[in-house]
Amino acid sequence: MTDPTRGVLYPEHLPRMTRLPPPAEASELVAWFWIPQWDLPAGETSRQQILGYPAANLVVEPQGVGLWGATTRAFEKELRGSGWAVGAVLRPAALVRLHDAPATLVDTHVELHAPELVQTVTAALPDLGDAVGAVSRWLSRRASPATADGRLANAMADLLMTDAAVLRLDDAAERLRVSARTLQRLAHRTVGLSPAAMIRRRRLQEAAQRVREDPDAPLAEIAAELGYADQAHLTNDFRAVLGFTPSRYRGAR
């Protein structure tokens, strides 16, 4: 499972956040579960800025269940009062069973009618393991078994999201022993983003984490290590997706 703060631009602002691996029956469907819980004093807010993974999320909250597509930009969520959510980072094999056009979900979401799931998860809390089990069973009933295409898409997503040596579409296609065109079609059909977009997101997440955690590292060095052409390329990627430069991000922290 990845670093819990990867993709979180200001982890010091996080409420109580727990990440858990999926149980065995949901391992082809869920990459991991994330569970925020918060209880803020009256009038206080917690502003969360997130650079999401190139993946969809199933999110159970007291008010309902949402299926959120992959994102092309950072997003913000402002927390008030008290609350919780149980989110699942979906693997492509699950998404294609829950929605027939993942590309239409990019940067948006749909509400799912699943009041019984909300009731079951609410009753399971505060036991996080029981809550994760409830969501896993619900997903397994609706998205299992994974298809052959779904398993190939899972392998693609695992590679693009975790292997820093994969910097180009051709790198991924060669590793998976398929054509670049096949990989492009598979990503569009099962994730909604191109493989290149998924690689860029992973690389930008890594860059933001390096800028945040290593304040003395030269930006040009970070850019080179992560496969950017130069520091200007890194800066342009930051500005296009996050709305600010690496220097400004580092200075604000």
Image (cartoon, rainbow, N blue to C red):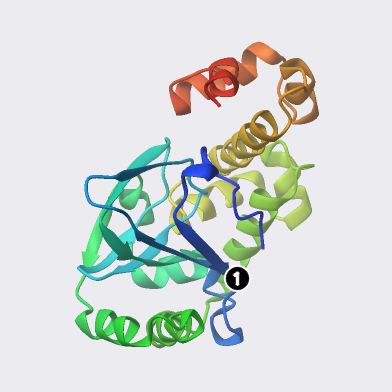
How many labels sit on residues? 1
Answer with left or right where residue 92 lies relative to residue 157: left
Answer with left or right where residue 234 lies relative to residue 121: right
Q: In which image quadrant can residue 151 be found?
A: bottom right
**Which part of the image, by quadrant, shows the C terminus?**
top right
Give the class, few, some or many, for how many residues have Cα within 10 Å of label 1's Cα (few <14, many ≥20). Answer: some
| On screen, residue 191 above or below 194 | below
Camera-side residue of 192 and 173: 192
Q: In which image quadrant can residue 157 be found?
A: bottom right
Looking at the picture, how far across and down is residue 36, in whole percent?
Answer: 43, 62
Looking at the picture, how far across and down is residue 72, in whole percent?
Answer: 43, 38
Looking at the picture, how far across and down is residue 242, in whole percent?
Answer: 46, 27
Does residue 8 appear in this view? no
Camera-side residue of 63 and 78: 78
Residue plotted at (59% across, 49% down): 5
| On screen, residue 81 above or below 46 | below
Residue plotted at (59% across, 77% down): 27
Residue plotted at (80% across, 28% down): 225
Q: In which image quadrant can residue 99 be found?
A: bottom left
Camera-side residue of 47 and 236: 47
Residue plotted at (62% across, 42% down): 202
**Which part of the image, by quadrant, shows the N terminus?**
bottom right
Looking at the picture, how far across and down is residue 177, in whole percent?
Answer: 75, 56
Does residue 219 appear in this view? yes
Write down the residue under mark 1. Answer: 151
Specify the amino acid type for callout 1: Arg
Camera-side residue of 84 and 163: 84
Dot 1: what SS? Answer: helix
- Residue most extreme to the front: 41
- Residue most extreme to the top: 232
Answer with left or right where residue 59 lies relative to residue 144: left
